[in-house]
Amino acid sequence: MKLFFTKQIAKIDKFTIEHEPIASIDLMERAANGIFKKIVEIYPLNTKFVIVSGSGNNGGDGLAVARLLYKARFSVRVFLLDISGKFSEDCKINIERLKSVDINFKNRNVIPDNKLKMQIPNQVRNDENLEFAIIKNADSISFKNDEVIIDAIFGSGLTRNVAGFISKIINKINDSGCKIVSIDIPSGLFGEDNSENNLQNIVKANYTLTLQFPKFSFFFAENNIFVGNWYVLPIGLHKEIINTEPSNYSYVDNEFVKNIIHKRYKFSHKGSYGHALLIAGSKGKMGAAILASLACLRAGAGLLTTHVPKCGYEIIQTAIPEAMASIDENENFVTNITSFENYNAVGIGPGIGTKNETKELLKNLFENCFKPIVIDADGLNIISKQPEILNILLNNSILTPHPKEFDRLAGNSENSYQRHLKAKQFAQKYNVFIVLKGANTQIICPDGNCYFNSTGNPGMATAGSGDVLTGIILSFLAQGYSQLEASILGVYIHGLAGDIAANENGMEYIIASDIIENLGKAFKKFNVSCL
């Protein structure tokens, strides 16, 4: 899925209205129906809803959803916020449509104590409630803790910090104790950079039902408290402009990954799927070498040689009999490897430590190896202590830092959005791929493109999970995938295996080896046949 900035989304909306063609109010109704269907999937019929609508088109969405919920026999209260004395045309139309639902509709500054009632035929339901009020100050609004609040105050086009009585209302929403559903984007959150935003005046949603595309700000950790669980609701925006509008950002989904997985040839042999070299392990950290090695083989590499210190010889031979062992001359850590010629790809870093002799090995690798390389863990920590060796790093190498490792490489960032921008600059400066690990792991390319991953869960935040990812990416590199394909496929399959593990046993139960154990089930999701 291509991702777009909020200005581009507005452009795509406009193009759809002009070229489908469809009236903007009908596009709003289409969106409202999608939101309504998702809400009734989440909440039962006896749920009481409070819709807080702004005066723009996001508010119009909220009013349309209120009407659909009421027609479906839900209890609904509506607060329409008079922000400036003006309402968008589509918002006005939805006010009139709400009025047409045969109720005693009145503009008032407060909700009356007695509910406005409408008699419904017995075969539907005897009594149903709809309340409406236009609100001009925060004192006129209140919530009950058994209600679900639907936030439709501001959309993704907001560019200024929320202030005035709206900020007080947002704080009332957040302090209500109610479950909160935001339409398109939590009110007060900007679509991209929130570094200068007032974070006290943003709705903290449990669910965000976003229209057609996830917003860029959803992918950054500091915004999770506002966005909650988010769902993308297609509303049929015009495919022509979606396909032609330029974007450097994509959201990796199942179909994208299915299209890049190689089919296996019937008469292939182990040499057909590459020979990987993994440099890993040190005294006390041989587990990292085992996890990365097993993941590499389970992800399909034909051959694997794991280079370990002498103390790891019996360990690696016993734990991974399918791997060949290359033994370093040093007892406790890796210091030297003579040749890289027999390998299709090299991985380095898991558990190697940062001894001076190991630093020399890494430098030697960068100077003499011209095969695809993936660098993780202590490999990255060595680079952060000797950043000058980045200048001899092979073009298109893959670096797989978690946020703290990346900060050690490129300097501290105030938030994950700024870290993302630094990672883009870093990737372009050194002509490398950055796999910035975390929720929605980012694959940042030297050409400026960025891919956000859609798989994975918090249960994968466990020791060794990164070593497993290194082994998977190394495996794909050895099999002949490009650096971009290996990064995207590795991250997606790694996360998918983690999701399968979580679904079977719960997130708290997961350890890194569970991710490896579920790689087979992850691959089976794609049902790829042989040639």
Image: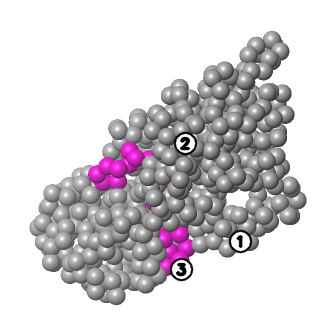
Reading the image, the residue beneath label 3 is 447
Q: Mark 3 belongs to which amino acid?
A: Asp
x, y percentage for residue 272?
50, 67
**Chosen colour scheme:** one colour
Q: Position of residue 293 (x, y in %)?
A: 33, 59
The residue positioned 46% from the left and 81% from the top of the image is: 428
- Helix, strand or loop at label 3? It is loop
Residue 206 visible in the snapshot:
no
Residue occupying the point 15% across, 73% down: 355
Label 1 or label 2, whichever comes before in sequence order = 2
- Residue that label 1 marks: 245
Say if the magenta span includes residue 442. yes
Q: Nearer the viewer, residue 103 or 463?
A: 103
Q: Which residues are magenta?
A: 440-465
Of callouts 2 and 3, the N-terminal one: 2
Three-letter residue code for mark 2: Ala
Q: Look at mark 2 in the image and give the residue it sits on.
A: 138
Q: Residues within 10 Å of mark 1 (few under 14, many from 20)?
A: some
Quadrant the N terminus occupies: bottom right
